[in-house]
């Protein structure tokens, strides 16, 4: 029940962070067609879309052949049509069946397997690449735009907490930006997300970016999202795993911004973040000054040190 | 396996299986019966009851998705009196949770395995009863008790269990679900599992020990093969589910933390992933448990009604065995987004894709069986072909889910729901119907009405396909499953009309089932009297009266050939009919003068 009581404080914290200079953004736009996937806003979404569509096409071809086969047999091989006395166990027939099965397997499953492995290694599970590309700060304190943005998500019934490292590049420090259900990312960027959960299993899904990853209590899971060029806008974050009575209301907003807008927001937000801590300076035995930050809102204390793997 | 098979001498068979006196009083005849045919009917009635309950729940879910938050017509005020006739979010969660569990464990399992397993195995292998008739009785009684537990759960103070059919921890623990409903549901699964294991052991032993002389493995009807393999999976993997259920109950009531981790856990944190492993080690074989008997039934029926031998019988047997083996090592594809090690995920992807090889073999065999046959368009055949049709759709759409990169997008969407409903629900349902129309004469001694059967077939097949294909389109468009009101999400707002159409299809599908209900009850009492062998097929059960006597076979028959001997040109010419029973000697010009009347009515008693 404790976290339920904290919910209200949480919203208060979020409200503080939402009060940032108007970085005008559009509302989440509805999708147009019921027969297509949601708009693809990911650098790599086209890989999944293509693989789903081509596999559907292959499946459709096989299905049409099967239906035609059954229909012809049903219409023609009936009403006294002389049945063939054939057990289908001649060597030739077995070899034929084997070859046919293998061809279909290599063609359809092979295509799926090859492309899936390629897509996982090059994009969706390329965690090493995302790590190598890193998160760098330049001298003037601005973010290296080529880097990978790191993000921590903590799910709980029924909302999404997000945490950014802040200017020091370290997680779980007072300059972290902490938000609720409002996750901002720059466009044309790889975002490395580490996800956990407070209570039950949730699943952090970004339909427009073709990715999702379960949020497991007691465990940190990893996910990569890639925002495409010109993907500025707002998109739904959806919970894909049944998580209780208000599962259907567990939505957040994934806001893709221009790099400069994002930088401006994150600078301001991390300055604000520091105001949520009480700075306590103490002197230790050796006479050195120790700076301690005490969180005024315990809800901002859910983070973890970034898992380098 | 077929040659060099050792058989007990025939005499031993006759003595091994005693002929019991038929029971006379009501209780031993209908309630504490040890007759496999009566137990089959017990499972049939219980299965029908729960099929109705689960079906009505499906209608409520469809109502909610078509008219979110609006009062349910007719029954709303009664069932949802506390929420003004509307389905509340928590009631909705209970509905889809119990819909899934009831359909799997209390509708399809009793109908496909409990009913057809009990009915057909002894009759088709030439036995007088199951190997352990008492265990068989206990199996149904355990099932009955589990059904009571589930139904009582609906009356629990905080409602029935609502953690989804997968009952994923920690949502299914006290962290996410309070009250007795969830506990009763888990207890129900455990108890029905006990019943399933008892039935499974019985089926396995019966098939191994009680096959009639000459009934070699490779002469068994494919129905029996399917049921036997299913039983092996049941006996191996239901205990895994049972253990997961017990640990879950411990977590709920005795303060353990096997599956609770993170902030909600005490000192020694458990592991929610452990539950997923246990669940899916059972859960993936389960989908084959629910389809193997249907595969077996339709493999036989396609041959029977095409009047043609089953194409590459051994190939079908091997394919089903291969699927049985593979089903145990692919479960990880349910956990592609759970945070599994990538290498493990990729391994499961390969293994899963390999399943398409035996599946293709089966399809090729089915298609070749009906090709160049002499198809009899009777209702069981229509349902068998319908099963191939929907299973084709369901199987092919599984490809997208076996592959990690496409599954990441489709995981937990309505695509998954459409896919497994086409395979586990539509194919199992049509397979069950094929079996019911086929064996109804053997169960009740009367024929089902053909015209009503055909109406039922076309209505069911068309609308079941439209319903689940519609769900698949919704999933493609991104609709996640288990959403009380999907249109809360902006990216799903535009799917309301699609879902309304799917709901109309589902309501129509339900309406067509009443044709079947009428046909079933009308035919049971007033249907045409069934001859002993109405379909003119050669398996052993059709040599008996309809319905058969309590002890089935007065003399245990001796089997001389496989179950699919049709269109043998020599025999056809000599006998004047296109089929050979499994027991009759091969006709020769001297022994069998052309006889237009099939050996219909009495036991074929002869020695090999």
Image: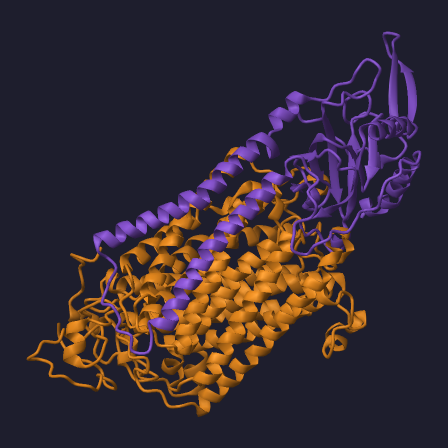
Name the residue located 70 percent from the left edge and 45 percent from the top edge: A39
> Which quarter of the rendering shows the C terminus of chain A?
top right
Residue A1, above or below A269: below
How many numbered markers are drawn? 0
Name the residue located 49 percent from the left edge and 63 percent from the top edge: B390
Chain ID, purple in image = A
The answer to which image quadrant residue B368 occupies is: bottom left
Residue found at the very far left of the displayed protein: B590
| Front-most of residues B359 and B42 | B359
Chain ID, orange in image = B
- Residue B137 in view, yes or no: no
Residue B97, above or below B80: above
Name the residue located 61 percent from the left edge and 54 percent from the top edge: B167
Q: Position of residue A79 (x, y in %)?
A: 33, 78
| Front-most of residues B117 and B386 | B386
Q: Where is residue A38 in the image (x, y as percent from the top left)?
A: 69, 48
Residue B152 as seen in the image, left or right of residue B223: right
The answer to which image quadrant residue A6 occupies is: top right
Q: How is the image coloured?
A: by chain
Residue B453, above or below B343: below
- Residue A299 in view, yes or no: yes
| Front-most of residues A256 and B10 | A256
Residue found at the very far top of the displayed protein: A286
Q: Position of residue A290 (x, y in %)?
A: 87, 15
Residue B421 as seen in the image, left or right of residue A176: left
Q: Position of residue B251 (x, y in %)?
A: 63, 50
């Amino acid at each position: 029940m404790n976290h339920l009581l904290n919910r209200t404080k949480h919203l208060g914290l979020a409200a503080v962070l939402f009060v940032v200079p108007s970085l005008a953004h559009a509302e989440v736009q509805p999708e147009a067609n019921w027969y297509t996937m949601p708009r693809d806003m990911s650098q790599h979404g086209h890989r999944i879309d293509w693989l789903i569509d081509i596999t559907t096409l292959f499946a459709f071809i096989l299905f049409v052949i099967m239906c035609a086969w059954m229909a012809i047999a049903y219409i023609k091989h009936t009403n006294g049509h002389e049945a063939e006395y054939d057990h289908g166990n001649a060597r030739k027939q077995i070899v034929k069946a084997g070859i046919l099965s293998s061809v279909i397997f290599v063609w359809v499953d092979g295509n799926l397997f090859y492309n899936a492995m390629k897509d996982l290694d090059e994009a969706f599970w390329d965690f090493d690449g995302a790590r190598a590309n890193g998160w760098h700060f330049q001298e003037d304190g601005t973010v290296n735009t080529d880097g990978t943005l790191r993000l921590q998500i903590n799910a709980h019934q029924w909302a999404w907490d997000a945490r950014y490292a802040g200017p020091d590049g370290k997680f779980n420090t007072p300059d972290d930006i902490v938000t609720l259900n409002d996750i901002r990312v720059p466009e044309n960027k790889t975002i490395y997300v580490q996800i956990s959960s407070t209570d039950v299993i949730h699943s952090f899904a970004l339909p427009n970016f073709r990715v999702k990853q379960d949020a497991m209590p007691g465990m940190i899971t990893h996910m990569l999202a890639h925002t495409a060029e010109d993907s500025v806008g707002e998109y739904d974050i959806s919970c894909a795993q049944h998580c209780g009575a208000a599962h259907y209301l567990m939505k957040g907003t994934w806001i893709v911004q221009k790099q400069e807008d994002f930088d401006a927001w994150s600078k301001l937000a991390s300055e604000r973040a520091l105001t949520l801590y009480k700075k306590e300076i103490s002197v230790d035995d050796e006479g050195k000054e120790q700076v301690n930050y005490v969180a005024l809102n315990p809800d901002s204390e859910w983070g973890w040190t970034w898992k380098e793997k | 396996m077929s040659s060099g098979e050792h058989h007990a001498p025939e005499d031993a068979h006759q003595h091994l299986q005693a002929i019991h006196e038929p029971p006379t009083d009501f209780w031993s005849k209908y309630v504490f019966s040890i007759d496999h045919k009566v137990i089959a009917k017990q499972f049939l009635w219980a299965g029908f009851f729960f099929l109705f309950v689960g079906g009505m729940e499906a209608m409520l879910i469809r109502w909610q998705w078509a008219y979110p938050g609006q009062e349910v017509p007719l029954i709303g005020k009664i069932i949802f009196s506390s929420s003004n006739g509307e389905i509340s979010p928590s009631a909705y969660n209970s509905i889809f949770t119990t819909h899934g569990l009831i359909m799997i464990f209390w509708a399809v399992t009793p109908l496909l395995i409990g009913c057809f397993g009990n009915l057909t195995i002894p009759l088709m292998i030439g036995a007088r009863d199951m190997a352990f008739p008492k265990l068989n009785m206990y199996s149904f009684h355990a099932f009955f008790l589990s059904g009571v537990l589930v139904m009582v759960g609906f009356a629990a103070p905080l409602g029935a269990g609502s953690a989804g059919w997968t009952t994923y921890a920690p949502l299914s623990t006290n962290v996410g679900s309070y009250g007795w409903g969830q506990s009763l549901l888990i207890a129900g699964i455990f108890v029905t599992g006990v019943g399933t294991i008892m039935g499974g052991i019985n089926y396995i032993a019966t098939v191994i020990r009680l096959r009639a002389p000459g009934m070699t493995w490779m002469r068994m009807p494919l129905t029996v093969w399917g049921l036997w393999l299913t039983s092996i999976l049941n006996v191996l993997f239901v205990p895994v589910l049972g253990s997961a259920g017990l640990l879950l109950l411990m977590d709920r009531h005795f303060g353990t933390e096997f599956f609770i981790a993170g902030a909600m856990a005490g000192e020694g944190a458990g592991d929610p992933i452990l539950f997923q492993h246990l669940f899916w080690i059972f859960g993936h074989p389960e989908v084959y448990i629910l389809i193997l008997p249907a595969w077996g039934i339709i493999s036989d029926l396609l041959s029977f009604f095409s009047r043609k031998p089953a194409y590459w019988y051994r190939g079908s047997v091997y394919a089903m065995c291969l699927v049985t083996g593979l089903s145990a090592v692919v479960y990880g594809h349910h956990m592609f987004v759970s945070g599994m090690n990538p290498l493990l995920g990729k391994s499961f992807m390969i293994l899963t894709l390999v399943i398409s090889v035996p599946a293709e073999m089966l399809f090729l065999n089915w298609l070749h069986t009906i090709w160049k046959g002499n198809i009899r368009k009777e209702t069981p055949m229509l349902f068998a072909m319908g099963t191939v049709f929907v299973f084709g759709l369901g199987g092919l759409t599984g490809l997208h889910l076996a592959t990690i990169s496409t599954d990441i997008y489709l995981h937990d969407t309505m695509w998954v729901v459409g896919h497994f409903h086409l395979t586990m629900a539509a194919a199992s349902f049509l397979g069950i119907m094929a079996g019911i129309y086929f064996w109804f004469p053997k169960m009740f001694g009367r024929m089902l009405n053909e015209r009503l059967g055909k109406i039922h077939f076309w209505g069911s097949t068309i609308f079941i396909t439209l319903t689940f294909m519609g769900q698949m389109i919704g999933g493609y468009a991104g609709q996640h499953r288990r959403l009380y009101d999907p249109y809360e999400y902006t990216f799903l707002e535009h799917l309301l009309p699609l879902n309304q159409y799917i709901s109309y299809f589902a309501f129509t599908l339900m309406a067509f089932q009443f044709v079947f209900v009428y046909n079933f009850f009308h035919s049971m009492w007033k249907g045409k009297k069934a001859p002993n062998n109405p379909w003119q097929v050669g398996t052993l059960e059709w040599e008996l009266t309809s319905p058969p006597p309590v002890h089935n076979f007065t003399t245990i028959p001796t089997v001389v050939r496989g179950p699919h001997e049709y269109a043998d040109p020599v025999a056809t010419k000599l006998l004047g009919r296109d089929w050979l029973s499994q027991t009759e000697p091969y006709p020769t010009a001297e022994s069998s003068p052309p006889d237009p009347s099939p050996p219909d009515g009495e036991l074929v008693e002869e020695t090999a």
